[in-house]
Amino acid sequence: MKNEFLTTQATYMYTFPKGVYLDTGYTVVVSDPELLSVVCGSNDDNLRVMEEYLGVPVLSRGNELTVASSNADTCRKFQLLIDKLVSLESASGNSGEFISSLIVGMDNDAIGNSVTDGIRIPHGIKRVYPKTEKQALFMSALKEKSVVFGIGPAGTGKTFIAVAHALALVLSRTVRKMVLTRPVVEAGESLGFLPGDLEQKISPYLRPLYDAIEMLVPPDVIKRMEDSRMIEIAPLAYMRGRSLNDSVILLDEAQNTTIGQMKMFLTRMGENSRIIVTGDPSQIDLPPKTDSGLLHSSRVLADIDEIALINLDSKDIVRNPLVKKIIQAYEQEKK
């Protein structure tokens, strides 16, 4: 059976820097210079991402893009990537993160919308795309479920994605405010002895959340949100008795909640509200013989349809590559 892709395109021979000659290839012509620039990316970065994914060289010559392979599946994926980059160019811009996310969803239709849409934050600095399949599942769950748990080691992007989604909800006026909270095990949940008002006491503990916010929206937008009380900082110990309506509530470092604290937190959810919980079970700082509320809730809530539990692992680490090696080394030590 003929390769339908190879029969519809011209085949070229190219010389590589190392002097390796290839006499087969599948070529796509992109006649529009602007679209060609989008497909190739800055300094041909997108082509390098394609090469890594396809496992074969991808070449650019004039307005011709060639994948050096006669394999039908490889050619199909190459064509599909180019088609998606061209068709989604106006929505995505020229983003290396975008093509990486496209690759994540190539063989998984269930996460297709999360990959192509990403998280768009009104007035934001950039759109956020998933870099791994489980990140895409996390994004999809955030759009579909009222309560979402993102559970995994450091560097998997769970907090960054959670903050991006919360900002998108608030700045699109889907909810009125975002509430940021976490347990303060280091201070024994007693903040009274710390200097400053309540916000000044808890702010250092929520710095990772603010780091993510500052990467996603400009300073003037953050200032406007703070002045309009669209961002609220609330220590977990101070949330008892509240009912949080029209809000997205983000609990970070949830592995350090007790069972009672987690139950209290989850039942603060009011009308038109969403809850996002993130935590790393490998970094539990609770006193000995104290059960983690995160681990307990992931067991008892697993069968509730409106709740999603997404477990990320070391394969999803997108921070410095060395972080992945460090975490894997500690995981091996446990075994």
Image (spheres, helix red, strand yellow):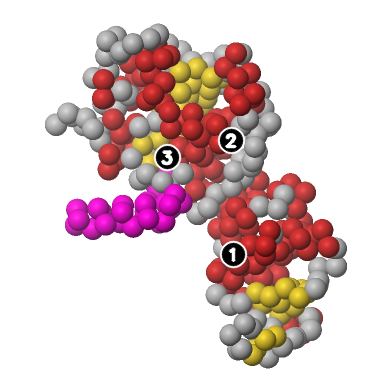
**Residue at label 3?**
150
Residue 278 location (% of width, % of height): 40, 35
Instruction: Decide whether the magenta segment is chiefly helix, strand or loop.
Output: helix
Q: Amino acid at mark 3?
A: Gly
Which residue bears the numbered disc 2?
216
- If the image is split into quadrants, where does the C terminus sit? bottom left
For the residue pair 212 and 310, the one nearer the viewer reads as 212
> Is 274 situated left or right of 222 in this image?
left
Residue 270 visible in the displayed image: no
Amino acid marked by disc 2: Leu
- Marks 1 and 3 sit apart, C-alpha to C-alpha, by 27 Å
Task: Identify the image quadrant of residue 99.
Answer: bottom right
Name the element at disc 3. Answer: strand
Q: CA gap, disc 3 to disc 2?
A: 19 Å
Dot 2 or dot 1: first in sequence order is 1
Dot label at residue 49:
1
Spot the residue most to the right.
31
Q: Nearer the viewer, residue 231 or 214?
A: 214
Q: Amino acid at mark 1?
A: Val
Give residue 11's mark. Answer: none
Name the foreground residue: 32 vs 287: 32
Q: Which residues are magenta?
A: 308-335
